[in-house]
Structures are given as C-alpha cells and as structure tokens.
Image: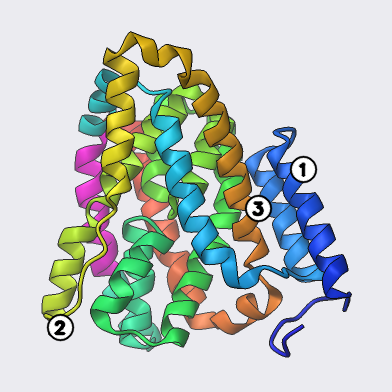
C-alpha cells in the first residue's frame, strides 16, 4: 500500500487482488450494467483499494478502443452517415463555443492557463482522450493533467446516471437522446454506456457522432500548438476510429459478417462494462480531493452550458 493511496480499510495485498478480480469477473459475466460496474469500481478503489492501479490507464485505453470497434459490427453505414450529418453542425458549434467559454471562465476563476485549457478541451471534444492528446502539446505537468482528468472523470461518472434519467423524464426519442449525449457527455465510454442503456438506435447515433467529434482532436491540437507556441510536439491521432468505420462497412456490405457480428457486439458491450469498472477503480478519494474547487466549478459550468444549449437546440431546431 503506497502512502498516497487512501482506502477506508487497510487490507492485505492478496485480499485486495482477490476482491478486485472477483468484482472484475462479475463485470465480465454480463449480468450487470455499465453504470453498476462504475459504482463497483468506485467501491473497490475507495473501500479496499485497487492493487493494479499502475495498469489502469493503459487497460482503459485498450479496452475502450476494442469495445468501440466491436460495436461497429452492429452498425449500418447509411444510418451512421445520416447521424453524422445531423450532428455535424452541433459538433462544430459546440466545440468552438466551449473552448471560447472555457478560456473566459478560466481567466475569471483565475485557474492555471494549461489546466483550464485541458478542462475545456476535455469538455469540448472527447474527455480523457482529448486531454491525453493535448497535454503533450502544451507541455502540461503531471498535476495540471491529473486535475483536468479528475474533473472530467467525476462529471463523466455523474452523466452516466443523470442523462438517461433526464432523457426518460423529457421523453426524448432515441435519435434525440443519442445526439444529445454524444455532444454533452465528455468521454466516449460514458457516452456509449448512457446510450446503450437508453436503446439500440441511441447507441448507434451516439457512437457515430462521438467518434466523428473525436477527430476534432487534430485541428484543435494544431490550433493549441500555435496558441501555446509549441511546434515540436507530436499529436496523438485516434487511428482506431478507422477500424471502427471498417467494421461498419463489413457489417453493412459483407453478408458473411452476420455470422460473427452478434458475438463481437456482445463482447464489445462486456468490454465497455469492464472499461467503466476500471474507470471507477481509478477514482480514488485522493484523486477527487486533489481536483480543487475552482477547476471543478469551471468543469461544471462548461458542462451545464453545453448540455443545456445542446438539449434546447435538439428539441427546438431539429
């Protein structure tokens, strides 16, 4: 147990590993939903501890990408193109308005410039993936990156429960909810988790629009490099999106794919459940405590603005 790891019960490392593996097997079983898996991860992280914490970030990244690719085998190219066209305007408008608003909020709250920009990019594009791509471009230090990731992960966890409840309360259609959560929820994992809970059509629309949104990491990173006057950093391009598109094409135009597609989609949904368990398992009390009030206020205000504006636009202008 490292001195920076807070848990409510100090347990033997072997007991920690056993509890963690058992909870992981519960998630793999397919009998629980992604939101429940997230809660189990939170419990594991803060009650007994995560004995595999050093592998967490890498496992989340790989599992999420494989899960998204797997979901592509359950989607149709024509429906995806239709969804992408619908979400394009909202994507462009929301990304740049969020970045501009984030700049002013950061100055108003007197937040470190790099931390503020990372929170804005995470809110505007695709959560932790955007932060991971932008952090080396602006050469942020570990604390700045950790604070931004903490803000995004906290709000993602809330969104996973809050958005489906609001969607049902407002009687949003599958299309409306899919588009809304793709725009207003930060991370791809929570977008897919919330949409999957809402329905199959919502899942297809949300996944397609969110991944199209993720491609905006590239132009935003280039603009960021110019603003921060840093020309040397490499930009992390989300290449797995191309494999996701290939999976959709195979599912749409190659009939033989139907023999394995349902199994791949089922595995992808289990992978997503495990991903959210691992995200919860990384949200230790010490991480939440280190975020600070001002960055969290910026994140909440940005999130509220993009969520409310997107919802009103979808309800009254589509």
- The structure residue drawn at horizontal position 24% and vertical position 77%, both measured from the top left corner, is 137
- The residue stretch that appears in magenta: 87-101
Q: Quick check: 28 left or right of 63? A: right
Q: Furthest residue to the top? A: 255
Nearer to us: label 2 or label 1: 1
Q: Residues within 10 Å of mark 2 (few under 14, many from 20)?
A: some
Camera-nearest residue between 117 and 243: 243
Pinpoint residue 206: horizontal percent, then vertical percent: 40, 36
Mark carried by residue 230: 2
Establish if 260 lies above or below 129.
Answer: above
Pinpoint residue 94: horizontal percent, then vertical percent: 27, 52
Mark carried by residue 26: 1
Camera-nearest residue between 313 and 254: 254
Marks 2 and 3, how far apart at CA: 36 Å
Camera-nearest residue between 24 and 42: 24
Specify which label sits upstream in the sequence, 2 or 3.
2
- The structure residue drawn at horizontal position 65% and vertical position 59%, both measured from the top left corner, is 280
Image quarter where the N terminus lies is bottom right
Image quarter where the C terminus lies is top left
Marks 3 and 1, how far apart at CA: 10 Å
Q: Quadrant of residue 111?
A: bottom left
Pinpoint residue 39: horizontal percent, then vertical percent: 72, 53
Describe the element under mark 1 as helix, strand or loop.
helix
Specify which label sits upstream in the sequence, 2 or 1.
1
Q: Quadrant of residue 99?
A: bottom left
Residue position marked by numbered label 3 in the rendering? 277
Pinpoint residue 269: horizontal percent, then vertical percent: 56, 35
Q: Quick check: 77 left or right of 45? A: left
Describe the element under mark 3 as helix, strand or loop.
helix
- The structure residue drawn at horizontal position 43% and vertical position 59%, both measured from the top left corner, is 303
Q: Residues within 10 Å of mark 1 (few under 14, many from 20)?
A: some
């Amino acid at each position: 147990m490292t001195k920076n790891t807070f848990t409510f019960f100090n347990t033997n490392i072997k007991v920690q590993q056993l509890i963690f593996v058992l909870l992981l097997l519960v998630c793999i079983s397919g009998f629980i939903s992604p939101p429940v898996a997230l809660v189990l991860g939170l419990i594991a992280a803060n009650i007994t501890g995560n004995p595999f914490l050093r592998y967490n970030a890498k496992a989340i990244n790989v599992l999420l990408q494989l899960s998204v690719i797997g979901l592509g085998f359950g989607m149709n190219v024509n429906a995806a193109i239709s969804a992408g066209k619908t979400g394009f305007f909202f994507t462009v408008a929301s990304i740049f308005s969020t970045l501009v608003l984030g700049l002013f909020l950061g100055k108003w709250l007197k937040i470190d410039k790099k931390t503020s920009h990372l929170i804005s990019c995470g809110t505007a594009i695709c959560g932790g993936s955007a932060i991971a791509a932008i952090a080396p471009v602006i050469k942020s230090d570990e604390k700045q990156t950790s604070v931004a990731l903490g803000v995004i992960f906290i709000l993602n966890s809330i969104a996973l429960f809050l958005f489906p409840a609001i969607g049902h309360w407002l009687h949003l259609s599958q299309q409306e909810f899919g588009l809304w959560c793709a725009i207003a929820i930060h991370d791809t994992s929570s977008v897919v988790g919330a949409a999957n809970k809402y329905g199959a059509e919502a899942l297809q629309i949300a996944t397609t629009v969110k991944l199209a949104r993720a491609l905006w990491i590239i132009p935003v990173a280039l603009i960021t490099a110019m603003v921060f006057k840093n020309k040397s950093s490499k930009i992390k391009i989300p290449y797995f999106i191309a494999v996701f598109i290939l999976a959709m094409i195979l599912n749409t135009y190659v009939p033989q794919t139907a023999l394995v597609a349902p199994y791949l989609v089922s595995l992808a949904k289990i992978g997503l459940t495990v991903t959210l368990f691992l995200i919860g398992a990384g949200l230790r009390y010490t991480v939440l405590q280190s975020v600070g009030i001002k960055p969290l206020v910026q994140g909440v205000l940005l999130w509220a603005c993009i969520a409310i504006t997107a919802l009103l636009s979808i309800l009254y202008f589509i």
